[in-house]
Amino acid sequence: MDERDMTNNTTNDTTNNTTNDIKSVKDAAAKWEKEKRQPFISERPERRSLYKNDLGHEIKPVYTPADLAERGFDYEKDCGFPGQPPYTRGAWANMNRSDHAYIGCYSGFGDAEETKPRYEKVVKWGCTKLEMAWDLPTQIGYDSDHIMATGEVGRTGVAVDTFKDIEIMFENIRLDQIKALQLLANSIGPIGLGIQIALARKQGVKFSAMQGFLQNDVLKEYCARGTYIFPVNSAVKLSCDVVEWCINNAPNWKPLCICANHLNAAGAGSHNAIAFAMCNAFVYIDELIARGYKIEEIVPLMRFLVDEREDFFVMVALPRAARKVWEQQVGKRYGVTDPNSPALRYDVSTYSHGGETLTEPINNILRIGFSALGYYLGGSTYIYCAGYDEAMGLTSETTCKVAIRTNQIINNELGFSKTIDPFAGSYFVESLTMDIANDITKQVDYVMKNYGDAKNAMDKGYFQGVMSQGSVRRQAEFENGERQFVSLNLFPTDEQLPTGAYRMDPAVEKRQLARLAAVKKSRDQARVKACLDNLREIAQTNRNTVDAVVDCLEAYCTLGEICDVWRGVYGEFQTLTTF
């Protein structure tokens, strides 16, 4: 018998043994079900007629090796090792044993003077990724003195009209003092990036000594969040300007965060939300490839914000499944065959929510903590926790501190960081990971086959339809008691609703308007005009806008003036009426 025959016989023997083992497990499970479980539940019935998660998966009482065998589970193909394909177990080889997850804090309110001490405190407490919350007028390109901003200045975040506001807030915080600074800037990406560039230059901080983070994912605004300004193609162009600038000047930055969280919150379900977000990512990638960049240059500057708010074990499995599907999709769609290509790595960021309630908000500490833990154990590398009083409004100083401490405890106590991906091999979690990965893959393939890309899927109302159906289902499940929230529809409280939410002093808006007027009066008007004219010419000739925006910011042009230049060139988006 030659060596090849011996190998084939060994393989056949192993397969037969495995098949026999699975049959034995199935027989034992059937025996247990008949002799133990059924007699038990005949006397003590299950609390629910059907156990399922928000994704629609029915959850079995017990999982065994047979469940993995039924799904065709292969350790190396479906699980593998951290830092290599299929990346199920983590994006990086040593994960949390080398680097703790970034500790983010999302904060900002009123004006720069009011926000400044909060930022200084959260950095002192150990925040490593400061995330600026901007008010709504700032996010959609209106200055505080615009009629559309009336009554909204500083309400949902800090008002930022000019670079002067940024200088005030960061007077005592150097960018190389924290690991990263993040701005949302979904519809005004070049402005968000420009602020980071201008601040780094003013402080003398090298781009390599810090990381600039931006959300900058404008596509999800058109179907889920709503802070859009420009027509879709022009908006994508601006988002890609930001990534292009960083490829050439700051390749260690993360200027594009592809968001699933807003899509899930709107009703998509966490699996569909990731699928839609991946389709959005392909739009940005295709645009940048059309500009001449390689996918290996693009994807390392991206990260992905996943979201699950209903189920701890889905929180663990979701990042694992998403990393696996991304590796497969990029390989298939862009022909990436090198297993070491950085384009295959899906870097996960999470915002830890747990279905916070307005009633008895102190309980939200547990909900958020379990959520953060689930994401951590699933291999998220960037985690920021919601404030437990967010259901009331902007977070208080105390809740910001609790959110930071929650991350720090998970990072440093109770043994969570001692091993990588501790749920690997769990019959339940691996089954769930494979099911979610299958769901995501089917949805991505459906969108790309039937609509061609995410832009067309949104234009035809497909994304919106899925989200609408999901939100209606969730509400119905809440009303019939299937979705339960302690103190709300389960063990409801008769306590009065809490008070103490942030309420802005009207004097803050007056102060912001006065500061804006003073900046406009004192700046070099000729320089302002020249910078805005240059930006207009660059936008009209379809060139990258980032450097021109930095010039505008350093000349103290207002955010509204910059956006008005773009409005004049690109026009404004006309709201979809598809439901």
Image (cartoon, helix red, strand yellow):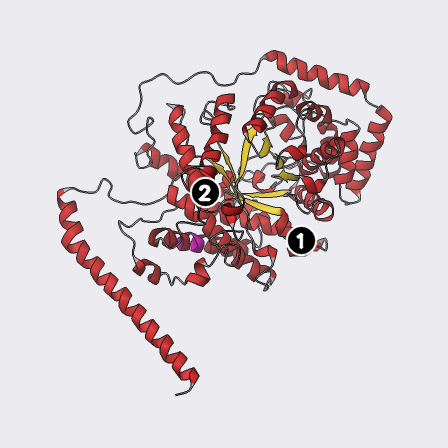
Q: Amino acid at mark 1?
A: Glu
Residue 265 visible? no
Residue segment shown in magenta: 435-439
Query: Between marks 1 and 2, how big is the CA–CA gap?
Result: 27 Å
Q: Is residue 308 depicted above or below 435 in this figure?
A: above
Q: Nearer the viewer, residue 1 or 79?
A: 1
| Badge 1 density bin: few <14, some 14–19, many ≥20, Cα 10 Å | some
Foreground pick, 22 / 578: 22
Left-right relation of 101 to 234: left
- Identify the residue at the far top of this view: 507
Query: What amino acid is labelled 2 in the image?
Result: Tyr
Residue at point 38% right, 45% down? 313
Q: Which quarter of the rendered picture does the N terminus lie within?
A: bottom left
Question: Which residue occupies the extreme right position in the image?
Answer: 526
Q: Which mark is residue 375?
A: 2
Disc assigned to residue 516? none
Q: Regarding mark 2 in the picture, which secondary structure is present there?
A: helix
